[in-house]
């Protein structure tokens, strides 16, 4: 029997449009939710400096003055066979990690759909990863998938890809977050000269810092990065076999600061693999 997700009482949520002066708080919020969304210049270029911008184009949700939801809308003409169709694009939807799974995303979509109708838009576009919760929700309420020409991608900043991917994974996986936090060591990911730790990612979520922890460095190259990107689609045994292969082929190196750090990681490795 499926249980309905708990809903936050409506009285606790304040929904309002953007107001000048919100930019800094919005930017902090988007960088929290997306990992590294971007700069204030990027936000202004996408919104306040956009030709069709209106304050109502940005929907903010707050709890006790703290932003917990953000949704943007862009209006533009779509030309088909020399005829103009006025359209709306739903962009930069974000919900604070503490409030996910409680219906806020659905409310953000509903508010912006009503805005689009009131402005006379006849088509609404949105983009999400196939199979994600937003994708499934939008399919359920009537969005259809439009086939597109093939898109080709080249990763030019792999360090940002892995950091952003891990940040998003931690937000969506409470069990993995708790397992890593209880390790008693800091896991560092190294790619060339770029280095960051899971403690850094967790501190951005929990706003806590821990000292006197052991240290484990996981040194990757570009090949191991792309292999690990497929971990979530693998079985537990396949993940373990893949890790062993990467280590044997020297595409991933693990460095321990102490024997205690080795033991701590060994005790938790199965729990970590099951949580990915």
Image (cartoon, grey):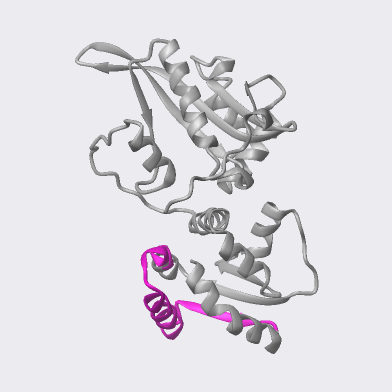
Query: Quick check: 165 above or below 147?
Result: below
Magenta range: 228-257
Q: Which residue is rendered at x = 48% and y = 23% of the image?
A: 112
**Which residue is more in the foreground, 80 or 207?**
207
Where residue 119 appears, as percent x and y from the top left, is 44, 11
Q: Quadrant of residue 58?
A: top right
Q: Which residue is rendered at x = 55% and y = 35% of the image?
A: 104
Q: Which residue is rendered at x = 67% and y = 52% of the image?
A: 205
**Which residue is more in the foreground, 268 or 1?**
1
Where residue 102 appears, as percent x and y from the top left, is 55, 41
Q: Quadrant of residue 239?
A: bottom left
Residue 126 visible in the picture: yes
Would you say 92 lies left or right of 155 here? right
| Farthest residue, direction front | 1
Where residue 222 appears, as percent x and y from the top left, is 44, 66
| Farthest residue, direction left | 81
Would you say 83 lies left or right of 227 here? left
Query: Quick check: 21 above or below 274?
Result: above
Query: Quick check: 221 above or below 262?
Result: above
Residue 197 visible in the picture: no
Quadrant the N terminus occupies: bottom left
Where residue 211 appears, as percent x and y from the top left, is 80, 69
- State yes or no: residue 102 in magenta: no
């Amino acid at each position: 029997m499926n249980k309905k997700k708990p809903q936050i009482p409506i009285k606790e949520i304040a929904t309002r449009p953007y107001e000048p002066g919100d930019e800094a708080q919005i930017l902090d919020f988007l960088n929290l939710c997306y990992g590294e969304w971007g700069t204030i210049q990027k936000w202004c270029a996408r919104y306040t400096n956009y030709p069709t911008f209106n304050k109502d184009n940005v929907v903010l949700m707050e709890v006790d003055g703290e932003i917990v939801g953000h949704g943007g809308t862009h209006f533009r003409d779509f030309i088909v066979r020399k005829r103009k169709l006025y359209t709306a694009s739903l962009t930069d939807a974000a919900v604070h990690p503490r409030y996910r799974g409680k219906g806020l995303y659905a409310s953000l979509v509903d508010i912006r759909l009503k805005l689009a109708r009131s402005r006379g838009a006849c088509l609404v576009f949105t983009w999400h990863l196939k199979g994600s919760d937003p994708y499934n929700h939008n399919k359920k309420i009537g969005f259809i998938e439009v086939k597109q020409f093939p898109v080709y991608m080249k990763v030019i900043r792999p360090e940002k890809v892995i950091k952003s991917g891990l940040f998003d994974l931690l937000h969506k996986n409470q069990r993995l977050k708790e397992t890593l936090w209880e390790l008693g060591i800091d896991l560092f990911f190294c790619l060339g000269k770029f280095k960051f730790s899971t403690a850094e990612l967790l501190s951005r979520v929990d706003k806590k810092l821990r000292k006197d922890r052991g240290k484990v460095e996981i040194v990757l190259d570009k090949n191991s990065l792309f292999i690990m990107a497929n971990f979530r689609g693998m079985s537990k045994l396949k993940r373990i076999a893949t890790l062993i292969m990467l280590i044997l082929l020297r595409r991933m190196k693990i460095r321990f600061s102490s024997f205690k750090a080795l033991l701590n990681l060994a005790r938790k490795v199965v729990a970590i693999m099951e949580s990915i």
